[in-house]
Image (spheres, rainbow, N blue to C red):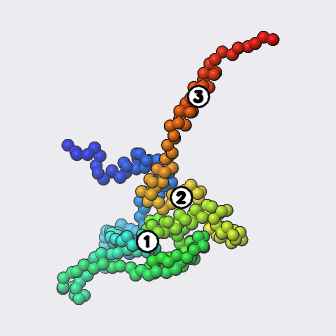
């Protein structure tokens, strides 16, 4: 006899279909769907079989991704999808010797990056690959706005994206309020990424943050008891007055 009504593997899926989780916006729930990131540390062949150049026989190909560990520090910077690779190496580069554990880590350094939309400079830990990706799209703002969530893989990156989208959604009040000419120039440059403010507020929020935000939206301030009694008394007097007969006087 099973110990649980539902297997533990689907508990997370069932949790999202009930309670306050089910009342989260649809566009936010869609953003939680898992997607495969762009391969960084390995290159998939994209085929199931290939011809062996030596034997001429068809052989099966296995695209096995390299397991990557993303430390907490990667969420506070922009690593461009890179992470730690944990494996083994031969001691003294001798294959006849024992294997020892080794961790390959990307080189991380702090660089100053300027956001044209936010009009602010940020000191962010980045990797060389991140700088190459920024150059490939011609700007820091374009890199943040164009890169999907699974490729950014950074809480800082998603917070920056949310701030940029909110600034674009509130162009009239927050985007260069003292420089109308610059406001029009920047807005025309990035208007392709504009989304409604109601959606931009949810971009990049963790599940815990989204639940708390939904709870605050649904929260109702308690109404004082005397106001409830006053409203009830006013309704009763109104009904009593309507129920009384009207006396008509003859002239």
Question: Residue 42: image x %, image y %?
Answer: 38, 74
- The structure residue drawn at horizontal position 49% and vertical position 47%, both measured from the top left corner, is 219
Say which of marks 3 and 2 sits in front. 3
Question: Which part of the image, by quadrant, shows the C terminus?
Answer: top right
Q: Is residue 24 above or below residue 171?
A: above
Nearer the observer, 37 or 218: 218
Task: Work out whether residue 50 can be spotted.
Answer: no
Question: Residue 56: image x %, image y %?
Answer: 32, 75
In the picture as drawn, the residue positioned furthest to the top comes out as 250
Task: Work out whether residue 236 can be spotted.
Answer: yes
Nearer the observer, 186 or 222: 222
Q: In this view, does 33 lie above or below 74?
A: above
Q: In which quarter of the image is residue 138?
A: bottom right
Question: Which part of the image, by quadrant, shows the N terminus?
Answer: top left
Q: Which numbered dot is residue 130?
A: none
Left/right of residue 185 with respect to residue 226 in the rendered view: right
- The structure residue drawn at horizontal position 29% and vertical position 46%, both measured from the top left corner, is 6
Say which of marks 1 and 3 sits in front. 3
Q: How far separated are the C-alphas under marks 3 and 2?
A: 41 Å
Left/right of residue 46 with respect to residue 122 in the rendered view: left
In the picture as drawn, the residue positioned furthest to the right comes out as 251
Label 1 packing within 10 angstroms: few (<14), some (14-19), many (20+):
some
Tag 3's secondary structure? helix
Q: Which numbered dot is residue 201?
A: 2
Nearer the observer, 14 or 213: 213
- The structure residue drawn at horizontal position 22% and vertical position 80%, both measured from the top left corner, is 100
Question: Residue 5: image x %, image y %?
Answer: 28, 43
Q: How far separated are the C-alphas under marks 1 and 2?
A: 20 Å
- The structure residue drawn at horizontal position 44% and vertical position 60%, both measured from the top left corner, is 206
The residue at which mark 3 appears reads as 235
The residue at which mark 1 appears reads as 76
Question: Residue 244: image x %, image y %?
Answer: 64, 17
């Amino acid at each position: 006899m099973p110990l649980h009504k539902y297997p533990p593997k689907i508990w997370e899926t069932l949790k999202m279909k009930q309670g306050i989780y089910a009342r989260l916006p649809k566009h936010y729930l869609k953003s939680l769907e898992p997607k495969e990131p762009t391969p960084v540390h390995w290159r998939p062949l994209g085929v199931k079989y290939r011809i062996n150049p030596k034997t001429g026989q068809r052989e099966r190909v296995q695209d096995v991704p390299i397991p990557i560990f993303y430390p907490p520090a990667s969420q506070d910077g922009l690593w461009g999808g890179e992470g730690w690779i944990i494996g083994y190496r031969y001691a003294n580069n001798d294959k006849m010797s024992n294997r020892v554990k080794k961790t390959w880590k990307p080189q991380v350094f702090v660089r100053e990056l300027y956001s044209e939309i936010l009009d602010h400079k940020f000191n962010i830990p980045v990797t060389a690959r991140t700088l190459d990706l920024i150059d490939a799209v011609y700007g820091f703002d374009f890199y943040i706005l164009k890169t999907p969530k699974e490729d950014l893989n950074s809480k800082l990156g998603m917070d920056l994206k949310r701030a940029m989208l909110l600034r674009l959604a509130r162009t009239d009040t927050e985007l260069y309020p003292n420089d109308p000419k610059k406001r029009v120039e920047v807005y025309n440059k990035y208007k392709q990424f504009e989304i409604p403010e109601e959606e931009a507020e949810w971009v990049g929020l963790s599940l815990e943050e989204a639940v708390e935000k939904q709870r605050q939206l649904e929260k109702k301030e308690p109404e004082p008891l005397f106001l409830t009694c006053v409203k009830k008394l006013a309704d009763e007097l109104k009904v009593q007055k309507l129920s009384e007969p009207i006396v008509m006087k003859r002239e």
